[in-house]
Image (spheres, helix red, strand yellow):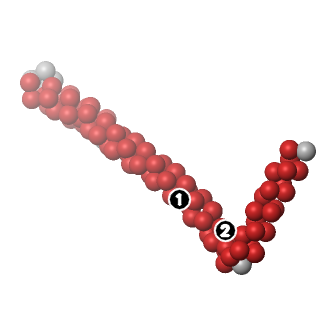
């Protein structure tokens, strides 16, 4: 019985919208839901893009860390030129 009342209320509500505003009301109703769904899709895509950019930046920054450590060790004299060159070629 509840489902029948819900269906009837929705049908009557939509029918009232057609009577009150004509087909323009139905069109505005459809456009409203298209706008809501488009906004949701836009927000999801934007958040995924931000996440992808953050992951890319983290990967880019993380890629240079071992080479920087090797440079610092070479500058301190902890490793030789040959060891530094070997590390550099391995990391690149």
Residue 48 visible from this viewpoint: yes
Comparing 12 with 71, the one in front is 12
Image location of residue 39, percent across then percent down: 53, 59
Q: Is residue 3 left or right of residue 14?
A: right
Q: Is residue 89 left or right of residue 34?
A: left
Residue 89 visible from this viewpoint: no
Comparing 50 with 14, the one in front is 14
Residue pictured at 13% horizontal, 21% vertical: 78
* Chain-order first, disc 2 or disc 1: 2
Image location of residue 81, percent across then percent down: 14, 31
Image location of residue 79, percent across then percent down: 15, 24
Residue 11: quarter of image: bottom right
Locate the C terminus by quadrant.
top left
- Give the numbered dot on residue 39: 1
Count of numbered labels shown in the rendering: 2
Comparing 28 with 37, the one in front is 28
Q: Is residue 34 left or right of residue 52?
A: right
Q: Is residue 91 above or below residue 51?
A: above
Residue pictured at 37% horizontal, 44% vertical: 54
Q: Is residue 13 above or below residue 21?
A: above
Q: Which residue is mark 2?
A: 30
Image location of residue 45, percent across then percent down: 50, 54
- Residue sticking out furthest to the right: 1
Residue 41: quarter of image: bottom right
Locate the N terminus by quadrant.
top right
Query: Within 10 angstroms of label 2, few (less than 14), some, or many (20 or more) residues?
Result: few
Residue pictured at 65% horizontal, 67% vertical: 29
């Amino acid at each position: 019985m509840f489902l029948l009342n819900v269906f009837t209320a929705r049908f009557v509500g939509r029918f009232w919208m057609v009577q009150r505003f004509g087909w323009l009301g139905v069109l505005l109703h459809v456009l409203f839901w298209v706008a809501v769904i488009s906004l949701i899709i836009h927000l999801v895509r934007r958040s995924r893009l931000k996440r992808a950019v953050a992951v890319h930046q983290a990967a880019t920054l993380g890629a240079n860390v071992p080479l920087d450590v090797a440079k610092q060790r070479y500058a301190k004299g902890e490793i030789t030129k040959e060891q530094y060159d070997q590390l550099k070629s391995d990391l690149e």
